[in-house]
Amino acid sequence: MSDYIIKAGNLKKSFNGEFVVKGIDLQVPFGGCFGLLGPNGAGKTTTLRMILGQSPLSEGNLEVLGLDVPTHASRIRRDIGVVPQLDNLDPDFTVMENLKVYAGFFNLKGGGLQERIGELLKFVELSEKANVRINQLSGGMKRRLSIARALVNNPRLLVLDEPTTGLDPQVRHLIWGRLRELKQSGTTLLLTTHFMEEAERLCDDIVIMDHGVILSRGHPKQLIKQHVEPEVVEIHGEMDALPGILTEHDIHRVEIVGETIYYFTNAPDDIIRRVENKPDVHYLHRPANLEDVFLRLTGRELREA
């Protein structure tokens, strides 16, 4: 048995002769939450599809749950749960029926299945909605049901593709709490998200990739310490007022984006003194976060989906 739930070596994927994943090495240990992050076009979705056996690799080797992909792709899928980015629940069925139909793909049935479904509905706080049709559920309820459905087969690996996009804060925090419980129970989570706070809260280890290569890897706190200064001062205001804030011999790292100046610094007091009494200027002083790391490594330019 491998020490890793996912192990890839020199993994490559090409489309029409162009490589979109360019020889990455990836080792994901059992347990915890592993984040696979990157902007649109980074290659993370293609990597995810290869891990799930949905897209053949062009070169390299890939093992999931200690088994070779694609040789044992069908066997591997029996121990994986997937929460897709877009809910694909059957609108013609009730909550309970959706779970039973999905369980049939794993040949799960009988009294044990009924008990399992009851536990899952309680876990995602949908017990009272068991006989409600899908089109009567809110977006947050559908997302929670998608998570319950992905857990029907008691997977060893749960893959979550942007699990809380578009949800309100209450639902988001409920889902985060349930995912932490799954981690504690020994389920390995593989998370892709564009919501950096989500990755920072949930992930024990993160890979940031772009243009088909891995740019950096580590615990969120480690990545922040490695790539950016510990504190940030964001300054907003009229463009005419901002140039006077900058000094010729500034010791701080500065980024100017539109009408905002970002100071990345170890010594914020000097900057705050420059702006705190300026009536046309507003500032925000905060600790550096994973989003600062992500933008520094992958850039601030827009990416089309």
Image (cartoon, rainbow, N blue to C red):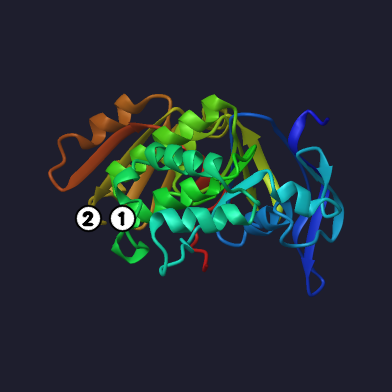
- Residue with the mark numbered 2: 238
Q: How crowded is mark 1: few (under 14 residues within 10 Å), some or many (20 or more)?
A: few
Q: Is residue 158 above or below residue 48?
A: above
7 vs 195, nearest the viewer: 7
Decide: is 4 above or below 149. Answer: above
Residue 184 vertical position relative to residue 21 in the rendered view, above or below: above
Mark 2 and mark 1 lie on one chain; the one further toward the N terminus is 2
Rendered position, 269 above or below 305: above
> Can residue 256 be seen at all in this image of the molecule?
yes
Q: Contact (CB < 8 A) between labels 2 and 1?
A: yes
Quick check: 262 left or right of 34?
left
- Residue 218 image offset from top left, x and y in percent: 62, 31
Quadrant for the N terminus in the image: top right
Report crowding for label 2: few under 14, some 14 to 19, many 20 or more residues within 10 A (C-alpha). few
Q: Where is residue 102 in the image (x, y as percent from the top left)?
A: 55, 56
Residue sitting at x 53%, y 59%: 101
**x and y, in percent, of residue 27 in the image:** 74, 36
Q: Residue farthest to the front?
A: 111
Residue 86 percent across, percent down from the top left: 47, 62
Q: Residue furthest left?
A: 279
Nearest the eye: 13 or 70:
70
Give the alpha-carbon distance from disc 2 to disc 1, as whole Å. Answer: 7 Å
Judging depth in this view, the residue of 270 and 98 nearest the camera is 98
* Horizontal side of residue 13 vs 39, given as left or right: right
What amino acid is labelled 1 in the image? Glu
* Residue carrying label 1: 259
Secondary structure under the numbered disc 1 in the rendered image: loop
Kind of residue at badge 2 = Glu
